[in-house]
Structures are given as structure tokens and as C-alpha cells.
Image (cartoon, rainbow, N blue to C red):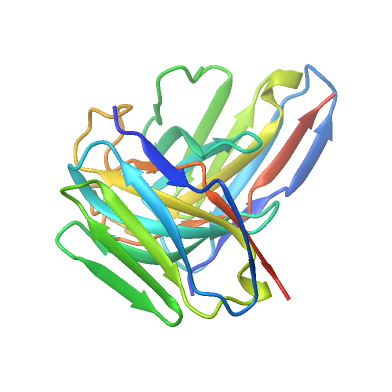
Amino acid sequence: GAVVSQHPSWVICKSGTSVKIECRSLDFQATTMFWYRQFPKQSLMLMATSNEGSKATYEQGVEKDKFLINHASLTLSTLTVTSAHPEDSSFYICSAREGSSYFSFDSNQPQHFGDGTRLSIL
Amino acid sequence: KQEVTQIPAALSVPEGENLVLNCSFTDSAIYNLQWFRQDPGKGLTSLLLIQSSQREQTSGRLNASLDKSSGRSTLYIAASQPGDSATYLCAVRQWGVNYGGSQGNLIFGKGTKLSVKP
């Protein structure tokens, strides 16, 4: 089946550090990838939608200068948390939706999730 | 604004029991509804997807129903096993672009944490 690989799975770093998280679709192309954040005992909250070759669409309240998203190819999207602080500590999950067309607003296409990245800022 | 609620928040049952997890949503204008499983510290595994025009979907011991007009879905698990222990998430996919500015955005509930005891 389709696999989304997310790396690293766990990061512990000092406040002020920038952290990059990678999300790869291993055996399918994904025009659209999604980045979610999940706080303990809370639901997944969408941070941004990433489209290959264009700027990401950020949800309300998410700082695009703090959470930099790059989707340079149909199989790779990255999320960089710049100058991370303790309040950025969370579980970050990426998701990739199958489709190689820019107009794959096709919600019937399967959406696959990575295993998440636990980010702890000291 | 779409809100997804899951009841109960946690559930503990003995092995072999049949059980029902509930999901409700406030806006019936959905494209589809999905049930996911999340193991501790892990990502999500899709279990069942129900299109807005469908009433139910089945996969093995799992059966999910959808009543769009009343804004409800249930996930039925038959003959539960310890390996079913996980958090089960319900998510609806919106039609339009007005919810958070994203097309086809998935709105998640907080999940039901299921524990099946041997």
C-alpha cells in the first residue's frame, strides 16, 4: 500500500533552533500534502496545505514566517519550524493525497498519513 | 464552522465485546467521512471512508454508518480484540473552500481512546 515516510520521528532541541521535518510519498505522487499539529488529547489541527510548485496555504492563526513549507517535488514536502520555542512543542503529522495533477481537488483520492514527528523544545 | 465531536472520549471493554463509537458533526454539507485509527505516538491509518451519498461501509469486523441529515456516524467493532486498542478518530471532509481557506480540508474529532482488555 501507499506509504508516507516522515523524518525525523523525534526531535529534542534548544529554544531558538530551527527544525526541519521531511515528508515523502514513497510509492505514489502527491500534488497536495498537508501538515497537521496535534497537542495532547486534542484533535489534529490542519496547519497548512502544500501544493507542489506553489506557495502553501496556511490556516488562520498559523504564522507562515515561522512554519516554512516547501513542496519542491511530487514526492517531498518539508516543514521548517524556525526559531522554535517551548510552545511549539507538539506532534506534527504530514499527509499526502494521491494525484499528480494540480487540479486534483479530488477528495475521493486517498490521503495517507506519516507516522508523525514528536518535537520537544527545551 | 464545522465541529466534530466524538463520544465517549475513552472506553474500556473486555475482549470479545461488540462496541459502538459515536461521531457527530454540526454541518451536514460534507463530501465524505472517514474513520482512522491512531496508535500511541504514531500517525493515522485509514479504516473506512463513507461518501456523502452512502449509508455505510464495512471492512472485516468494522462497520461504519453515516446519517448525514442528522450529522451522525457510528463505528461498530464486532468481537473486539486487544489488538484493537488504539484511539479512533472521525474526520469529515468539507465541500467548499471557506473552512480555513483549504479545499477539501479534513476536520477531525478529538478521538475515542479504546482499551480492550484480555
Q: What residue sits 64% from the left and 65% below the top?
A: B85
Is residue B61 shown to the viewer in this render? yes
Question: Which residue is drawn at the image coordinates 29% and 64% (left, top)?
Answer: B65
**Looking at the picture, how far across and down is residue A80, in whole percent?**
62, 31
Q: Which of B85 and A39 is in front in this view?
A: B85
The answer to whether B21 appears left or right of A40 in the picture is left
Foreground of the two, B118 or A66: B118
Report the quarter where the C terminus of chain A lies: top right
Work out whether A80 lies above or below B92.
above
Q: Can residue A84 be seen from the camera position used here?
A: no
Q: x and y percent of residue B9 in the render?
A: 55, 46
Residue A74 at what x, y percent from top left? 43, 53
Residue at 61% x, 70% y is B84
How many discs appear?
0
Location of residue A46 by image quarter: top left
x 67%, y 33%: residue: A90
Picture coordinates of residue B36 (x, y %)? 47, 59
Question: Height in image: A81 above or below B95?
Answer: above
**On screen, residue A36 above or below B84:** above
